[in-house]
Amino acid sequence: MTGLSISRSCRCVGLSQAAYYREPVPADIRDADIITALNEVVEERSNRGFWKYFKILRRRGYRWNHKRVHRVYCSMRLNKPRRAKKRLPKRERQPLIVPTGPNRVWSADFVSDALYCGRRFRAFNVIDDFNREGIHIEIDTSLTAMRLIRIFEQIKGEHGLPETLRVDNGYRRSQVFLHKH
């Protein structure tokens, strides 16, 4: 025995006297109402995350602290891993084709800008890589896939199609080989 009083011993270790005298209650008994409520919500909707469940519990009138509910949620092993970002497969780098004449290699790309009033627009450019001739420029606020098909049908009638169409997909360049009909 050290001779310290209970109040002084509790003060030294940072424990309240009420906690010293209170008997510890097992977590499964202390959190039984939270466990029951979470089980009900999970049975109704099994594929939700913690915050959705917590908001549902709040709407039902339960006022538990979110940290306490999260501790019980994790102890029940309901937490799901975060969804990983879907990665695109790596593409093989291809050397750039140097065109030997006109209408052999074209490049196609989108450019966007805004007017003074703030309205945005996009431009679709098709350029011949041999002589840097602008084959076609289409400008509008919305350029759909069907519209691009119509543009290439129009270009096919006027110029024919190239052997290779070079397009820029984000940070990588890819080459599309067109078949002349």
Image: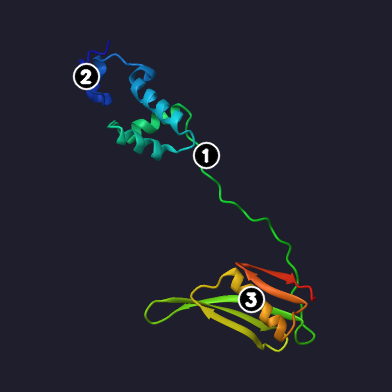
As drawn, is 18 to the left or to the right of 180?
left
Dot in front, 1 or 3: 3
- x and y percentages locating residue 22 in the rendered image: 26, 15
Q: Residue furthest top?
A: 1
Vertically, is 55 above or below 146? Answer: above
Q: Amino acid at mark 2?
A: Ala
What residue is drawn where x is 30% and y is 36%? 59
As drawn, is 172 to the left or to the right of 83?
right
Q: Are marks 1 and 2 in contact (CB under 8 Å)?
A: no
The foreground one among 46 and 54 is 46
Q: CA distance from mark 2 to mark 3?
A: 80 Å
What number is the disc on residue 18? 2
Position of the N terminus by quadrant: top left
- x and y percentages locating residue 161 in the rendered image: 74, 79
The foreground one among 140 and 1 is 140
Label 3 SS: helix
Vertically, is 37 above or below 113? Answer: above
- Packing grade of label 3 (10 A; few <14, some 14-19, many >=20) is few
Provide the residue designation for mark 1: 81
Dot in front, 2 or 3: 3
Q: CA distance from mark 1 to mark 2?
A: 39 Å
Dot in front, 1 or 2: 1
Q: Amino acid at mark 3?
A: Arg
Q: Quadrant of residue 144?
A: bottom right
- Packing grade of label 1 (10 A; few <14, some 14-19, many >=20) is few
Provide the residue designation for mark 3: 150
Vertically, is 31 above or below 47? Answer: above
Q: Amino acid at mark 1?
A: Pro
